[in-house]
Structure formats: C-alpha cells, structure tokens
Image (spheres, coloured by chain):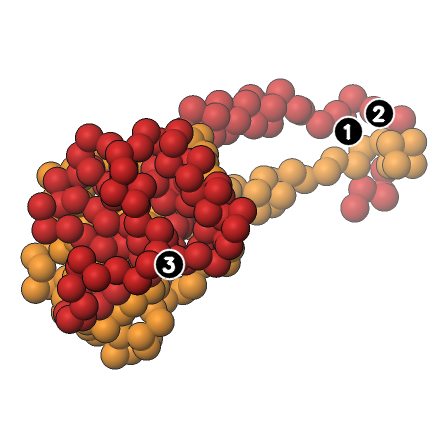
Chain colours: A red, B orange
Amino acid sequence: MARKRRRPDPVGAELEMTPMIDVVFQLLIYFIVTIKPIDVITNLDVFRPAPDQNAKPDEKPPNLVRVGVYQDGYTVNDVPATPERLDEALAKVASIDAGQTIMITVSAVSEHGQLVKALNLCAKNGLKSLSVVSASN
Amino acid sequence: MKKQYPDAKLDMTPMIDVVFQLIIFFVTTVNLADKANETNVRMALAPNGPVEETKDPRTVTVDVIADGRIQIMKTTLSEGQLFTILNNARKTAGQSTPVVIRGDLTTKHEAIKRVMDLCGKAGLWKIRFAALKEKA
C-alpha cells in the first residue's frame, strides 16, 4: 500500500477510534434496550381417546388411576385432593409402575391452568401415559 | 508494521460496511423467527415439563386465548376454519402431525376441548399442551 514513502511519521498512521466506539456503544444500548428474553416453552404430551368411543364413562377398567380436574380442585380416584396430595398419590403410582395410564377427567368449566398443573405433576413423577377426557359438566 | 510503514492507514470503511450488513441481516431474520411464535397467551407454568427437543417442522400451533377464541398466528379462526386447516395438515403431513395447543391459563376447558375435538375429527391424534418451563 504505502511503500513509496518511508517517513517516520506515526501521527498519520493513527486510527481514529472514537467514532467507532461511539457507534458500537449506540448499538450495544439499542440491543440491550430492545432485547426481549425468550421464555422456555415445554410441551406436555397427552393422549386423547376418540370422542365417539362407545365405552360408558362409568365402566372404567380397574387398573386406571383416575384424576379429576375441577374448577375448585382435584380428585384422585374420586376422592378430593389438594395439589400436594395429588403429587403424593402420583408419586406413589409412579413408584409402582411408571407406565401406568393416568386418566385425567377435566370439567368443562375448570381453567386450563389447572389441567396444566396436573400434567406438570404427572411429568414431575415421570408418568407418560396420560389420557385426557373432557367431562360434560 | 508501524515501524516498517509509518504512513500505512488501515481502511476501516469496507469492514464497517460488512459489519453493518451482518447486523441488519441478523436483526431482520431474528425478528422473523420470533414473529411466528409471538402470542398474547399467558401460559401456565410447568417447571417439570420435558425439555423441548428438536421441533417437528410440521407442528401446528393453535392458540386459545382467555375468552376462548381460537387463533393461529394471532388470526382468529372459526371452528370450521380450524377444521379445514387441521384437515389439510393431516392430508399433506400425515396423521402424526403434532398439534400444540397453547391455552391461556384462565381459559375454560370447554374451549380447549373444542380444539381437541376438532383435532380428533380431523384425524390428528398427537396433541400437546404448551406451558412455560421457565419464565424469562
């Protein structure tokens, strides 16, 4: 490039850093302000029995664990339970057989958050075979 | 280098040009990727949920907002429209196409049930519920 002149003039070779650093700071501030942290999303798998199956709801096979999700709480095998109690019951089921099918019956008026909470407890205890059935009431 | 060529100036302009091109490229593409997943839905927390493995590219994400309306990418759909979409998904991508239902935590189960029933009617059986593993 500049081979022609060999004057000992280091001043001319000075690179002006100030505007570059200014711009970099502007960019840094812009990104820090605009960045939106991304939530970690998880997907909870469920099995949905075909709605047109002709099995009556009251003749459940005995090896199913029934969890009910209602507007005001949960039930385990038709016994009302707190979330803590549900967790304990699921842990007990999982310790016997983690492949056990859990049938979750959800009331139509319950909030979706409650179902997710129940599914979360199932995932916590390693239960994977989850069947979600919607109750008509 | 300074000793050998005291007058040599490094031309920064093309370098900065390239850096700006890269910045603009990444800013625009990152926003595009986020747009598809943007939602007003407040998901319930499920800290014990499984870690999301590689996402199936066929996944259909259906949002159910708090008042029970069904949305895909922020567009409100009627049940008939959703059924058409799910049915087309089944025809083009097969029965194992996953449907992710992203329900608001206050949505009544009725609304979720409607989406699940439509999935069943369309022949899609792989239903998953999206939840927040970790809130950022």
Marks 2,1: beta carbons within 8 A: yes
Chain designation of label 3: A
Comparing A118 with A95, the one in front is A95
Q: Decide: few, some or many residues near mark 2? Use Cα within 10 Å; few <14, some 14-19, many ≥20.
A: some
The image quarter containing residue A117 is top left
Q: Where is residue B97 drawn, in percent x and y?
A: 34, 69
The image quarter containing residue A80 is top left
Q: Residue at x 43, y 24 (%)?
A: A33
The image quarter containing residue A12 is top right
Q: Decide: few, some or many residues near mark 3? Use Cα within 10 Å; few <14, some 14-19, many ≥20.
A: few
Q: Which residue is mark 2?
A: A9
Question: Is label 1 in a helix, a strand or a loop?
Answer: helix
> Where B128 falls versus A110 (above or below)?
below
Both on one chain, marks 2 and 1?
Answer: yes
Q: Which residue is mark 3?
A: A63
Which badge, 2 or 3, comes first in the chain's sequence? Answer: 2
Q: What amino acid type should be assigned to the residue bearing mark 1?
A: Ala
Q: What amino acid type should be assigned to the residue bearing mark 2?
A: Asp
